[in-house]
Image (tube, helix red, strand yellow):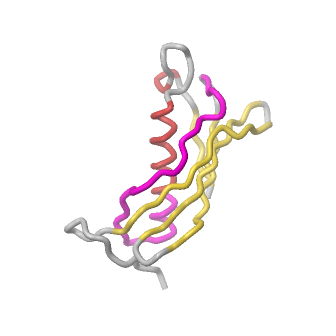
Amino acid sequence: MDHYKLVLPEHLNHYGNLFGGNLLKWVDEFAYISANLEFPGNQFVTIALDNVEFRHGVSNGEILKFSTVCTHVGNSSVKYNVQVLGIRHRTAAALFETNITFVNINSEGKKQTIQRSS
């Protein structure tokens, strides 16, 4: 599933580059949206984010493409690979990639089996 985000001045640090924390927030948010759309009716929380390595700086006006792909579904957890591309002048550059894992919890915060749609 693909998601897009426009980098605006409020996302930048004092050097004019994207704050890494904003990128991580968007990775979490877009993967969460993908999980909820693919597995509706579950209550997912983020439990793990793999390697965090920023490959290139990102500046104002960049359009970011977040591609989320479900790579594993367990009993109570689901994992997504997230690739982030920066799109400039119709060419794309790989900026970031990670795996993010969510677990489905009940109202007491305990793991529970993922409910699948019929």
Is 27 part of what is drawn in magenta? no
Which residue is found at the position 26% from the left and 69% from the top?
Answer: 110
Which residue is found at the position 49% from the left and 65% from the top?
Answer: 37
Count all numbered tags in the image, as a single digit: 0
Q: Please indicate whether residue 43 sits to the left or right of residue 118 in the image.
A: left
Magenta region: 33-59
The N terminus, quarter of image: bottom right
**Up-down relation of residue 75 to residue 12 (above or below):** below
Residue furthest out toward the top: 14
State the image coordinates of residue 53 (x, y, percent, origin top left). Answer: 58, 38
Q: Please indicate whether residue 92 sits to the left or right of residue 20 in the image.
A: right
Q: Please indicate whether residue 43 sits to the left or right of residue 38 in the image.
A: left
State the image coordinates of residue 105 (x, y, percent, origin top left). Answer: 31, 68
Residue furthest out toward the bottom: 118
Q: Please indicate whether residue 24 sits to the left or right of residue 63 in the image.
A: left
**Up-down relation of residue 65 to residue 41 (above or below):** above
State the image coordinates of residue 82 (x, y, percent, origin top left). Answer: 59, 52
Q: Quadrant of residue 81?
A: bottom right
Which residue is found at the position 48% from the left and 75% from the top?
Answer: 74
**Up-down relation of residue 67 to residue 52 (above or below):** below
**Up-down relation of residue 55 to residue 104 (above or below):** above
Is 38 part of what is drawn in magenta? yes
Residue furthest out toward the front: 51
Q: Quadrant of residue 36?
A: bottom left
Which residue is found at the position 60% from the left and 23% from the top?
Answer: 60
State the image coordinates of residue 47 (x, y, percent, origin top left). Answer: 39, 57
